[in-house]
Amino acid sequence: MRPRDFGKPLVFLSLLLLALVLALAVACGDDDDEDTGDEGGDGGTIDISGVPELEDGELTVGSDIAYAPIEFFEEGTDNPVGLDIDIAKALAAELGVDVKFDQVADFAGIVGDLKSERYDIVMSAISITPEREAEIDFVPYFGPVGTGILTPTGNPNGFAALEDLCGFTVAAQVGTYQVEQMDALNADACKDDPIDIQTFPDNPAAVQELVLGRIDAELADDPVAAYSALQSDGKIELAATGFESAKYGIGVRKDSTALNAALSEALTNIVASGKYMQILQEWGQEEFRLQG
């Protein structure tokens, strides 16, 4: 009879105990990771302890969410999407806060709404102009971006410059820089044959007037005008672009100096990490990356 081998059971028990120890170690490691997350593992890379607007852990953004592809509601939903939305989310991640987008009642009143503290910031394809800078501060993040002229396909009136609009009926969204441009033309180059300026509460309504043939042209920022043309099933085209370029800026109140500094640092971080350019590429806007 062969003697019983007591070594094999002992080896088996030793291996079993080792496996149990390793399993417990992994489980404890997972618990540590979870605890870290609960204590701010999703926090950002920037110290915001001195930023009063972010004490509630949320960045509230006022925006006119009807300016595709910069910001718009996903079709059939109230889910905001677009370039500005993604950049704001990336900035909020750097700050370690949540982000909430509020639809403004009227783009023309967006600066006043910010000054009345309805939002922490405003971010809505806002061109930085001297008039706006007199009221609020800006963190530049996109552009320069110029104005584009949308016309019926074939550009029947041959528009190639803003001055060519004199005597024609032209639409734009109320409160936009394009309305200011046309007002300036009517005070100078078009004073003897003024533009019939038609304003609408949002850009899609102005574009629809052009599609329906009720106006001769529509003005919007270049990326928005190009997107509108692409979405028109060939009914309209972007006839001319690049007029009077200006950067887009995140609007902050003049007394929000700490928030301004934090946003500027967050923007620097997402540019350095490549996240900024990734967002621009996802929306086909690389050519309008922040310059200077």
Image (spheres, rainbow, N blue to C red):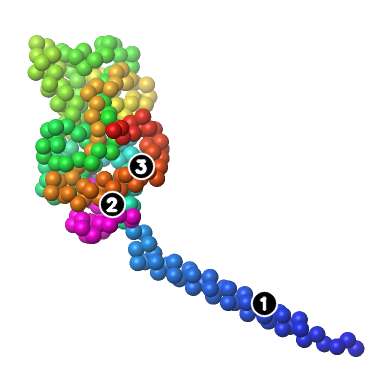
The answer to which image quadrant residue 96 occupies is bottom left
Report helix, strand or loop for mark 2: strand
The answer to which of 44 and 228 lies nearer the viewer is 44
Q: Foreground mark, 1 or 2? A: 1
Picture layout, residue 108 above or below residue 208: below
Q: Earlier in the sequence, mark 1 or mark 2?
A: 1
Mark drawn on residue 271: 3
Residue 51 lies in the magenta-colored region: yes
Spatial separation of the CA atoms under disc 1 and disc 2: 51 Å
Spatial separation of the CA atoms under disc 1 and disc 3: 51 Å
Residue found at x 15% / y 21%: 182
Kindly identify the amino acid type of the residue bearing the numbered disc 3: Val
The answer to which image quadrant residue 9 occupies is bottom right
- Which residue corresponds to mark 1? 15
For the C terminus, the quadrant is top left
Q: Foreground mark, 1 or 3? A: 3
- Which residue corresponds to mark 2? 99
Kindly identify the amino acid type of the residue bearing the numbered disc 1: Leu
Side of 278 where 61 appears, left or right = left
Residue found at x 23% / y 48%: 261
For the N terminus, the quadrant is bottom right
Give x and y (percent) for residue 22: 58, 73
Span highlighted in magenta in the image: 44-64
Give x and y (percent) for residue 130: 14, 32
The answer to which image quadrant residue 291 occupies is top left
